[in-house]
Image (cartoon, helix red, strand yellow):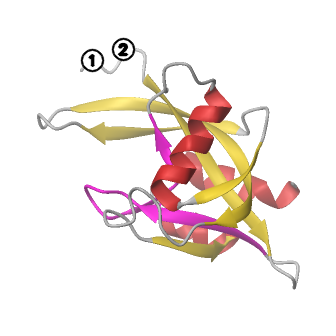
Amino acid sequence: MSRNAAPSLQYAALPYRRRADGIMEVMLVTSRDTGRWVIPKGWPVPGLGPQDSAAREALEEAGLVGRISERSIGVYHYEKQLADGSATRCAVETFALKVERQSRSWPEQSQRRRQWFALPEAAGAVQEPELRALILKLAAI
């Protein structure tokens, strides 16, 4: 893929909650291929808008339901490894998801781990610098 080509668009949910002691936490999930910490994200779902696509990813990848922000909180970029061994650059439009319910079972539970992190730990656990910045930006919510 050419470096000058437009990146492929994905949508993501950045799931968060505030604990009783006031600490804000973010849920991260492991990617299926590398096992690194990421947020629930995926390709646009036909018939669903960007926010609803992001909310659906949070349900499928982490078993989370909540209130998704109407507006994107930002975009981050990463290189997605494709099944044929090639890579494509992705732009991920990200929506904050205030988690209201966490399911005990969910579609991808056998393929991923999920874990709550305080903001600084979540920022340190992800590899993408732009995603790190989005996680830290949640403190202002």
Q: Nearer the viewer, residue 18 or 121?
A: 18
Give the vertical position of 59 relative to 55 (above or below). Answer: below
The answer to whether the residue labelled 2 contacts the one labelled 1, judged by CB atoms less than 8 Å apart, is yes
State which region is magenta: 24-42
Name, please, the residue furthest toward the top: 5
Please state which amino acid type lies under the numbered disc 1.
Ser
Crowdedness near tag 1: few (<14), some (14–19) or many (≥20) residues, C-alpha within 10 Å: few
The quarter of the rendered structure image containing the N terminus is top left
Residue 46 location in percent, x, y?
49, 20
Crowdedness near tag 2: few (<14), some (14–19) or many (≥20) residues, C-alpha within 10 Å: few
Question: Which residue is under mark 1?
Answer: 2
67 on left or right of 91: right
Judged from the image, the secondary structure of the residue bearing numbered disc 2 is loop
13 on left or right of 69: left
98 on left or right of 43: right
Judged from the image, the secondary structure of the residue bearing numbered disc 1 is loop
Residue 47 location in percent, x, y?
55, 19
Can residue 128 be seen in the rendering of this structure? no
Q: Which residue is at a point 46% across and 55% down the rendered structure image? A: 61
Magenta highlight on residue 40: yes
Q: Which label number is shown at residue 5?
A: 2
